[in-house]
Image: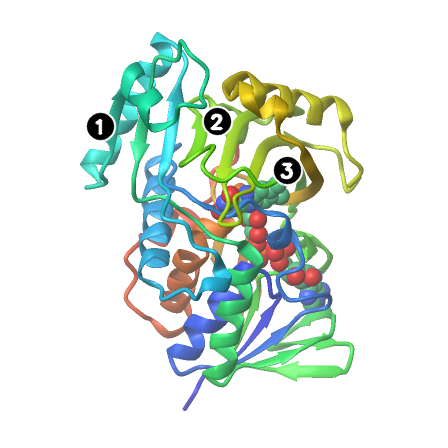
Amino acid sequence: MKKRVLVIGVGIVGAAIADRLQAEDCSVTLFESYIPGGGTTAAAMGHLVVLDDSPAQLEFTARGVDLWRKEPLPARCEREACGTIWVASGAEDVDEARAKADRFARKGLETEWLDAARLREREPSLRKGLAGGLRVPGDQVVYPVGAARWLLDRALERGAVLRREQVLALEMGGLRADSGRFQADAVILAAGLGTSHLLPELPIQPRKGHLAITARVPGLIHHQLVELGYLKSAHGRVASSVAFNVQPRATGQLLIGSSREFAGFDASPNRELLGRMLRLAQDYVPSLAQVPVIRTWTGFRPCGPGNLPVIGPWPASPGLFVAVGHEGLGITTAPATAELMAHHIVGAASFLDPDPFLPGKVAHA
Ligand SMILES: Cc1cc2nc3c(=O)[nH]c(=O)nc-3n(C[C@H](O)[C@H](O)[C@H](O)COP(=O)(O)OP(=O)(O)OC[C@H]3O[C@@H](n4cnc5c(N)ncnc54)[C@H](O)[C@@H]3O)c2cc1C
């Protein structure tokens, strides 16, 4: 007997879960109140990146990148196998790069240390005087909305059903939506920032980010370039921060990030922070000063109680599962999240240890 599953939210996370569960022979119905992929997913950079803030995060992101690499993404997903260079400014960064290379090597992940001269050969637009860079060739880039839509389309081809309506409340054994009540064996809450309306016990805070996109300058940059201090910006809980992060897009444009800020749901640009972000990018890549920025936007990362998303059964409500709080890594980790969810729902083999992600286990920052 097929398991009936209701998935609330069609961002990259809900789409990946629906696609995977439908492949596991579940009968999936998705609910989306806005536009599939139109929430935080539409605001993202699309860097598929291995990060190593904790052993669990390293496992999780490496699995996500690995699963994405195996997907036959069509051209509309704009996959770029550009790799990442973690840019080292000084001696402290070089030590950090070495430690990162060791951690990656222990996981069997390939890296290459570039000294100052080799870094300039690879990325001549970077400013002179940098200490070097750690290249991670396996990281990639995708167009997030295209990737979410592709996952959704595959789920629909596999037999999933999409309902364009709002879920109003969770109920025992199901949910209540605009058009009425729905019963199922499992309800999966993948509603990003909409989570707390339906499950107030699980607060998901908006963490605002700015991005800027330039006119076309093909060939100016070849890798996703990120400063080694990025994790300090990503995982501190300071009120606001910026980090150098520039991405070459398939269109020849450059996507410039990144900022983090707790500012409620105020989507208006913070000109001071945006200015700092753009000046930092020009500091690393001086010729960016001559490249027009044609558009900027803001988006809200769904930030949970700790540094990992919350994925698994919600203990107080049998049949309810959550997959939320992916902060700045939801594009990278959507397929790994779907794999964990398949483990919880149908007992599929899980490559990852589900424990660190369980509700109640996610360490508070
Ligand atoms: C500026 C920025 C840059 C980023 N860059 C990257 C990056 O380079 N790499 C990376 O891996 N990640 C990145 N991220 C993070 C990534 O975008 C998120 O982690 C991810 O998109 C979260 O996906 P989600 O499906 O959980 O949420 P969402 O995409 O927000 O999807 C949730 C969906 O649920 C729907 N919904 C909510 N409530 C209801 C309801 N009651 N009924 C029906 N539907 C409902 C919403 O309409 C929405 O479509 C970035 C984020 C930002 C803001």
As measured in the structure, the alpha-carbon distance from the residue carrying label 3 to the one carrying label 1 is 31 Å
Q: Which mark is residue 229?
A: none
Q: Which mark is residue 211?
A: 3
* Residue closest to the eye, 209 or 172: 209
Q: What SS does tag 1 mark?
A: helix
Of labels 3 and 2, the one closer to you: 3
Is residue 304 visible in the rendered image? The answer is: no
**Picture residue at 65% right of the left edge, 47% below the top:** 203
Residue 296 lies left or right of residue 150; in this view the side is: right
Q: Position of residue 10 (x, y in %)?
A: 60, 66
Callout 3, which amino acid?
A: Leu
The part of the image, by quadrant, that contains residue 179 is bottom right
Q: Which residue is mark 1?
A: 102
As measured in the structure, the alpha-carbon distance from the residue carrying label 2 to the one carrying label 1 is 18 Å
**Picture residue at 55% right of the left edge, 16% below the top:** 283
Q: What SS does tag 3 mark?
A: strand
Q: Classify 175 as above or below 271.
A: below
N-term mark: 3 or 1: 1
N-term mark: 2 or 1: 1
Q: Which mark is residue 230?
A: 2
Is residue 149 visible in the rendered image? The answer is: yes
Residue 354 lies left or right of residue 108; in this view the side is: right
Circles 3 and 1, Cβ within 8 Å, touching? The answer is no
